[in-house]
Image (cartoon, grey):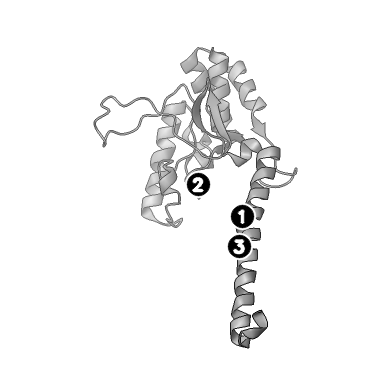
Amino acid sequence: MANYFPPAVRRHLSALRMLLVLTVITGVLYPLAVTGVAQAAFHHQANGSVATDNGKTVGSGLLGQNFDLPKKNPADADEAARPDPKFFQPRPSAGSYDPLASGASNLGPNDPGLIKAIKDRRAAVAAFDGVNPRDVPADALTASGSGLDPDISTAYAYEQVNRVAQARGLSQAQVHQLVADHVHGRDLGFLGEPRVNVLDLNRALNGLSG
């Protein structure tokens, strides 16, 4: 019956059939297949690497977060955050680890604001962790490109050991070993640098403290 239509109409009908077929394949069947494989083979990763403790979601292994003390006045939106000495702290974030504000500061290395921020961070971290300012690692001073970096360097993790151990009444050896147990090596043995996931480390720290 299609032969009774003019050539131009037949071409449009063929294009419409192809559109419907490809829509079903690429818009329905393919997503369902990929989702099924992901849920079956990579269930944890496919669902956001969500971490739970006692059935309560405490974060994601893919997203950094702050570990701060509760506000003295919860109604005061301008009250400065105070890092909790009982937890390992993440690297700075230009967006305060707000997932809706992911991004960097875009400040150049000669920007006066960035230079001052690094100087202030060095002094604050040194005082907080009880170390010499010159021993503060670079990732404790500079924010990550995403603003949501879940990892810190091994140097920054080990630098915080004494402060965390003292705050929790644990031995430095216990906390040092806990950090060592949570060091992730280079990807494929040669990509990137060894790192420590802050959320995973703090969850293990809570378990160690009982």
Residue type, numbered disc 2 = Ser
Q: Does residue 202 appear in the picture of this structure?
A: no
Q: Residue at x 65, y 26 (%)?
A: 180
The type of residue carrying mark 1 is Val
Q: Disc 1 or 2, which lies upstream in sequence? A: 1
The answer to which of marks 3 and 1 sits earlier in the sequence is 3
> Could you tell me residue 159's position as x and y percent?
54, 29
Label 1 sits on residue: 28
For mark 2, give the secondary structure: loop
Quadrant where the N terminus lies?
bottom right
Quarter of the view holding residue 174:
top right
Query: As drawn, is 11 to the left or to the right of 166?
Result: right
SS label for mark 3: helix
Viewer-nearest of discs 3 and 2: 3
165 above or below 61? above
Mark 1–mark 2 distance (CA, rounded to whole Å): 37 Å
